[in-house]
Amino acid sequence: MSIRLSIEPVNKVIDGKATAEVVLQEVKIEVEQLKQQGIEPCLAVILVGFDPASQVYVRNKVQKAEQVGIRSLEFRMDAETSTETLLAKIKELNADTSVNGILLQLPLPKHIDENTVLQSVLPEKDVDGFHSENVGGLSQGRDVLVPCTPKGCLRLLKDHLGDLSGLNAVVIGRSNIVGKPMANLLLHENCTVTIVHSRTRHIQEICKQADILIAAIGRPRMINADYIKNDAIIIDVGINRIEENGKTRLVGDVDFDDVYPHVSAITPVPGGVGPMTIAYLMKNTLHATYIQHRH
Ligand code: GUN
């Protein structure tokens, strides 16, 4: 009889908070270098209305900007602000050469024409990567501003796996903010990419083929062990607030405890993708600054 000892990998949990700190440190060093050349990167954040979650996100963004030496401007506009007033504010910030990045916190109040407003941000200041010029540029593989969350996810994957070439990647969710840009980024890394969504047939079977599984659906703990290929790497983009045992808590789109024994690595919620999104907003502000000083 032979004895086989199996050793659990020390840590299968991908620490997004720690990686985000590394990214912020990278940004901080570059910001210092820019400042020595007389350039001070500046991010303008606009919040319309009083959504409590949005207020927390904006506060975090401003605080992280401060941490890395990026100047931040915060504009709070009341919930009744008209599309025209918002467009006028963006026009003013577009024209201000001391402002390098413009971020409009979503969701906007229902009466505002979101598409018109997002398209009015100059593409080279569009740190969210939502402008169609940037969306098209990403699809063509040009060096444009790309949405922060997928960029953060890609960084976690590359830090963990190195080369992604030839791997099967399945993205669950087809949003413009995460699913579609994520699929494009993975395609540029030479993955074989599938997007699945609410109308997809045989979704579990498709997910079970994934070496890399990205969950971005917004349904608490929907992805359980039935969706997972053994030793897959799981990136959980979901941030869902649920009531459990009389308490509010944050959970992802993945049932962490159920999938954990089967995966090679997984991001937790909180502490996975969330901190990476903000860190990449800072990277994008830096990128925007470089683009504007290239001309
Ligand atoms: N609200 C939730 N996520 C985002 C994001 O990535 N960008 C903006 N602007 N607003 C958001």
Image (cartoon, rainbow, N blue to C red):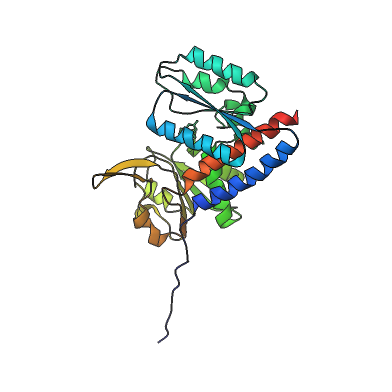
Q: Is residue 183 visible?
A: no
Q: Is residue 62 visible?
A: yes
Residue displayed at 68% across by 23% down: 97
Which residue extends farthest left? 246
Residue displayed at 72% across by 41% down: 33
Q: Considering only vertical position in the picture, is 106 above or below 282? A: above
Q: Nearer the viewer, residue 41 or 161?
A: 41
Which residue extends farthest bottom? 1
Name the spot of residue 236 as percent of width and height, x first.
Answer: 44, 47
Q: Nearer the viewer, residue 213 or 128?
A: 128
Name the spot of residue 1 as percent of width and height, x first.
Answer: 40, 87
Q: Considering only vertical position in the picture, is 244 above or below 65? A: below
Q: Considering only vertical position in the picture, is 18 above or below 80? A: below
User: In which quadrant of the rendered image does the C terminus lie?
Assistant: top right
Residue displayed at 43% across by 60% down: 230
Q: Nearer the viewer, residue 4 or 257?
A: 257
Name the spot of residue 87 as percent of width and height, x first.
Answer: 53, 16
Name the spot of residue 294 as percent of width and height, x first.
Answer: 74, 31
Counting labels gives 0
